[in-house]
Structures are given as C-alpha cells and as structure tokens.
Image: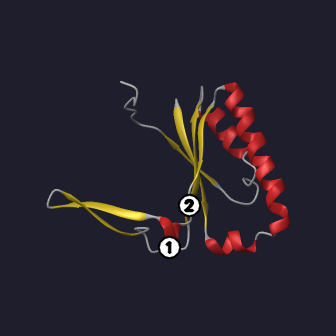
C-alpha cells in the first residue's frame, strides 16, 4: 500500500536552525532517503519551496487565474513529502518514525486511497 508522509515547517523554525547544523541535517536526510530507496519502499522524496513561492490556480472563464498562495492563512506549511510503498501500515509508521526530525516534529502519514498511473 502506498502512503504519503508529510513534514510541516514554518519560516521561523528554519530561520532558528543553526546554519552550521544544516550539513549534518541534510546528510542524515540523504542517508534516510538512500536506505529506503534501496529497500524499494521510498518511491520519492520532495522538498518544497518556501510558502512565499506557492501559488493558487483556479479556472475562470476557461483560463487559469493565478494568485499568490498559500491558500491557508497559517504559519505552518508542508515543507516536504515522501511517497512510500509499504507492506503494511505498521511498516509505514516505522519508516516515518525514522525520519531525521521525527524526534522533534511529527510526521503526518496518509494512506493513498486512489492512484492513477502516470505511465499509461
């Protein structure tokens, strides 16, 4: 079964993270990604741009209508997401708990209800 694991962030959190700690944090994340890519359980890991770069797209009169986002008026936003393919929910939970920042920030885990293959 596939799962989406999401990490939330906010600009204040990122600004308060010591610059000298970023290389170690990124190395830990890359090690996590490598480990689960090799097992076949991590299908993709995606870090998102700051919320200031988000856009809202609607259709008005058949054409795109684009405004600055994000939609929700909140300081927290999705900072990254991972697509997992696991044998069980318990396995997905164990992988999510191994994410480098899971000891200080929760990981939101969602089962994928429906998938439409992109390669058809």
Image quarter of residue 119: top left
- Does residue 119 sit above or below 14 in this rendering? above
Disc number for residue 59: none
Looking at the picture, how far across and down is residue 34, in whole percent?
A: 73, 35
* CA distance separating discs 2 and 1: 16 Å
Task: Name the residue at 77% across, 69% down.
Answer: 17
SS label for mark 2: loop
Which residue is disc 2 drawn over? 49
- Does residue 25 sit above or below 69 in this rendering? above
Badge 2 local density, few (<14 within 10 Å), some, or many (20+)?
A: few
Residue nearest the viewer, comparing 100 with 117: 117
Looking at the picture, how far across and down is residue 65, in whole percent?
A: 26, 64
Looking at the picture, how far across and down is residue 107, in whole percent?
A: 63, 52
Task: Name the residue at 68% across, 31% down.
Answer: 37
Task: Name the residue at 82% across, 56% down.
Answer: 23
SS label for mark 1: loop
Q: Earlier in the sequence, mark 2 or mark 1?
A: 2
Task: Name the residue at 56% across, 60% down.
Answer: 49
Which scheme is used to colour this image of the protein? secondary structure
Badge 1 local density, few (<14 within 10 Å), some, or many (20+)?
A: few
- Does residue 51 sit above or below 102 in this rendering? below
Which residue is disc 1 drawn over? 74
Looking at the picture, how far across and down is residue 100, in whole percent?
A: 76, 50
Relative side of 57 to 72, left or right:
left
Relative side of 33 to 73, left or right:
right
- In this rendering, the label closer to the viewer, 2 or 1: 2
- Does residue 44 sit above or below 76 in this rendering? above
Image quarter of residue 40: top right
Are the residues flagged by discs 2 and 1 in contact, CB closer than 8 Å?
Answer: no
Relative side of 83 to 13, left or right:
left
């Amino acid at each position: 079964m596939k799962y989406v694991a999401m990490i939330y962030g906010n600009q204040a959190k990122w600004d308060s993270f010591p610059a000298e700690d970023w290389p170690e944090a990124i190395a830990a994340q890359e090690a996590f990604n490598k480990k689960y890519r090799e097992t076949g359980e991590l299908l993709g890991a995606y870090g998102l741009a700051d919320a200031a770069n988000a856009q809202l797209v609607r259709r008005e009169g058949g054409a795109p209508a684009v405004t600055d986002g994000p939609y929700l008026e909140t300081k927290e936003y999705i900072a990254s997401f991972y697509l997992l393919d696991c044998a069980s929910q318990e396995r997905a939970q164990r992988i999510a708990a191994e994410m480098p920042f899971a000891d200080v920030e929760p990981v939101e885990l969602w089962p994928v209800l429906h998938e439409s293959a992109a390669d058809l």
